[in-house]
Amino acid sequence: MTQKLVVVGNGMAPGRALERLFEMVPGAFDVTIFNAEPRTNYDRILLSPVLSGEKSYEEIVIHGDAWYRQNGVTLHKGRKVVKIDRASKTVIAEDGTQADYDKLLIATGSVPFVIPVPGNDLAGVLTYRDIDDVNAMLIAAEQGGHAVVIGGGLLGLEAAAGLKARGMEVTVIHLMPTLMERQLDAAAGQLLKRELESRGIKVVTEASTRQIAATDPCLGPPRVAAVELQDGTSIKADIVVMAVGIRPNAVLAKDAGLATGRGILVNDRMRTSDTDIYGVGECVEFEGNVYGLVAPLYEQASILARELAGAPGAGFVDKALATKLKVTGVDLFSAGDFADGDDREEIVLRDAARGVYRRLVLKDDKVIGAVMFGDTSDSGWFFQLIKDSVDIAGMRETLIFGPAYAGGGNADPFAAVAALPDEAEICGCNGVCKGRIVSAITEKGLTSVDEVRTHTKASASCGTCTGLVEQLLTLSLGEAYNPAAVKPMCSCTELGHADVRRLVVAKQLKTIPDLMQELEWKSSGGCAKCRPALNYYLLSTWPGQYVDDNQSRFVNERVHANIQKDGTYSVVPRMWGGVTTPGELRAIADVADKFQIPSVKCTGGQRIDLLGVKKADLPAVWADLNAAGLVSGHAYGKALRTVKTCDGSDWCRFGTQDSTGLGVRLEKFLWGSWTPAKVKLAVSGCPRNCAEATCKDVGVICVESGYEIHFAGAAGLDIKGTVVLCHVKTEDEVIEVTAALIQLYREQGHYLERIYKWLDRVGMESIKAAVVDDPTRRNALFEGFMHPQKFSQSDPWAQRASGSTDSHEFSPIANLTYMEAAQ
Amino acid sequence: MTAMENVWLDIGTIDDIPRQGARVVKTPMGCIAVFRTASDDLFALNDRCPHKGGPLSEGIVHGTSVTCPLHNFVISLETGLAQGADKGEVATFPVRCQAGRIQLEASQLARSKDAA
């Protein structure tokens, strides 16, 4: 029976727990999530790259809206739970929303600690916890000026580096004598300080904040002006970022009467003092420890999921943790325990000139702590020694030089990774071990870090293990792995799609033989991969000049029907916007009868598919369909396919605009155009979105005030919700923007690259800039789309039905079957 | 049998087949695909891919190979052997061009029929 699971909080830990739960027992729980933030689950570890501009918010979203829909999760965005009523098993949100639970998961995370000094509530004093904080910092950084970061720990330093990258003058104030003293020893802390100072970040240690001074109230609402230290120093500040630590957010649990300490007390199965209530993430306390790094939180999430699924395995144990600082160009690693002590010994390596520092802390011939600065390439190996409590007596003399010397001294740069056992953890965030990555590389033929991310999730969270993943790719593939190399189009050339597109224009290449000659193709006549791509590139680059090479097209596009497994074809006439007539349906029925077509079915794009047509019958089938006004639906092409519509304002009581009419207009406008990959559209008459426009290449959602244009959706190999391109007021604008967007895609897209992949590659900014923000460019793109339409909007079926085109395609060259009779 | 030896059957002109293309000849033992390469060489192969029986005559012709339209098996037009990692073989037939006319050798067709 379905149980009701309510989740309070929507961070990374509950997100991972639900992912695992849905994998193990799909449909077993009816899940409702309350999220105090008005959004879906995103990767908080990657806030620093967003702050520094290396990533966009879209890139760090873990679960988009579609994921919640797919898993039947009710997500209450921006609703904060204020009360848990354990007697009636209900949670209540601030706005009064209630939900009953059978099982409750509390994942309220942590709250940033704000130091209790006067002025800590002034405008301009920020914390660093969520994307809202990042956005507030980005807005402040646009004005330039001075930023003071209070706290020289992991988060504070990442914030400082990010703000510096955004052009602010940054000072870090730290209470302790050295930076990151919880993760680094004093020497490494000093090296780090010097590194940051060389990047123009001021660092003040042993500095205690007395108060935050405000601007002169006569100059408007007071905001932060300076940070004053105990010793009287005043540091100018336009913003202050407090990053002095976090504490578990256990208020809700405490108010509900659950056992709490610093955090919500849980056992090794993540159960709180109430058997129906669980806790996970930064809000919980386990055996006196609270956690803020992702690896143990994901471990908790997996244990929780198994527990809920009724398949409990090993319980949670406190383990050694490793830290890396995510500041580009600063290599820093620490793990385990590295405090001094009488029973401990240390091995230190310093190379001041190279800025390299390594320190290992040993106890009873085992490594219990490691700090590395400047060169962290062997960190995985040392971390494994710590986790496995390996006896290092036999390799002590060379231990500090890393695994390359552990076996007796070859200096192979990959020895460290090669030496790792299969169960060595490579990606701490996602708990992916070496063996799993290597087997994925070999079994699935992966050749890039991106592919490894897709298949194993390794390097998909914080990304600090990317170097290790690259080394594993090199180890597994040898010279075949070249991270810098563009992926060649095919084995006929070293050039990638982007190179070929560029060279077609630069060298004015206008035929396939010219192109192959000029770009030094390695094969004679190319192959079935490159020839269709080249034909498309020439066709889209030289419209009206290039003569389409039928022999370089896949059979479907050559004969304008879809080949089936038995060599017959399917025929899909266009139904503009999904609208048909009794006359058209009669014609389809008559054709099916006359040519004994075995199967008639509806497609997903609101039209009718005639399956199993013999090739020789195609021209006659088309002639009959043409006679009823039906033309090719291009269901076989890398081309405009369908424009799916809902009933719209003509019929539907909710319709805001004439979605059907707009869909028909769009289809009549766009049909016949060749594109890098298939293009599907939909128009929904209201946000209920019955035409499912938000998983199409281009989707239009009608609203009272006009039209929202979405794009880059997919519902095939990948499932992607669309992103909003813009909002426009009139149908004409919809058509102009859509045509401009498709034209930009035609000019930039790689062959077989769907719109969502093109977006991933080129980025939203450049597309928006061309299609939305710059009317001149949009108009040029629109004209660019219109020009080839003049000669491509001609029904390929009609040309062939009349026998005037490609008649050789549809009949045998000779019939020798008489020979049998002759014998 | 011997009576059929060296009998060449006319099936059409070379221009009936597009360069880098193929046409089908119907025979008592099934369809034969006759290919014309970019350099006007002719090849005749059984029109069934050894993989799942796809019509090779519909594939993209490149160099002296054809790629099956169903699952991208690449077949050598010269030997009938599947290329690369794939395994399989297609029967090939003698074909020639005489004064612009394409001719298939009849005895091979008959022998294949017996074998089939």
Image: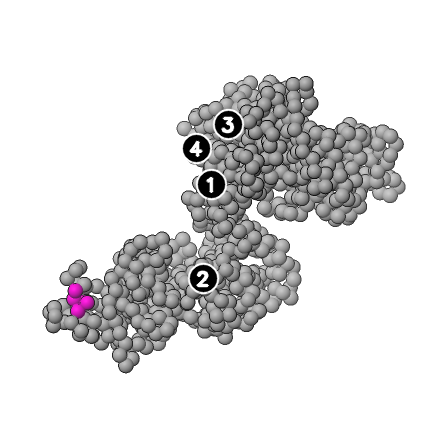
The residue where tag 3 is placed is A304
Marked residue nearer the N-terminal end (2 or 4): 4
Marked residue nearer the N-terminal end (1 or 2): 1
Looking at numbered disc 2 in the image, what kind of residue is underneath it? Answer: Cys
In this picture, which residue range is highlighted in magenta?
A: B107-111
Badge 2: residue crowd in 10 Å (few <14, some 14–19, many ≥20) = some
Is residue A237 positioned above or below A244 on the image? below
Query: Dot 2 lies on which element?
Result: loop
Contact (CB < 8 A) between labels 3 and 2?
no
The residue where tag 4 is placed is A24
x and y percentages locating residue A483 in the rendered image = 55, 50
The residue where tag 1 is placed is A438
For the residues labelled 1 and 2, the Cα–Cα distance comes to: 28 Å
Query: Foreground: A667 or A321?
Result: A321
Looking at numbered disc 4 in the image, what kind of residue is underneath it? Answer: Met
Q: Residue at x 51, y 55 (%)?
A: A487
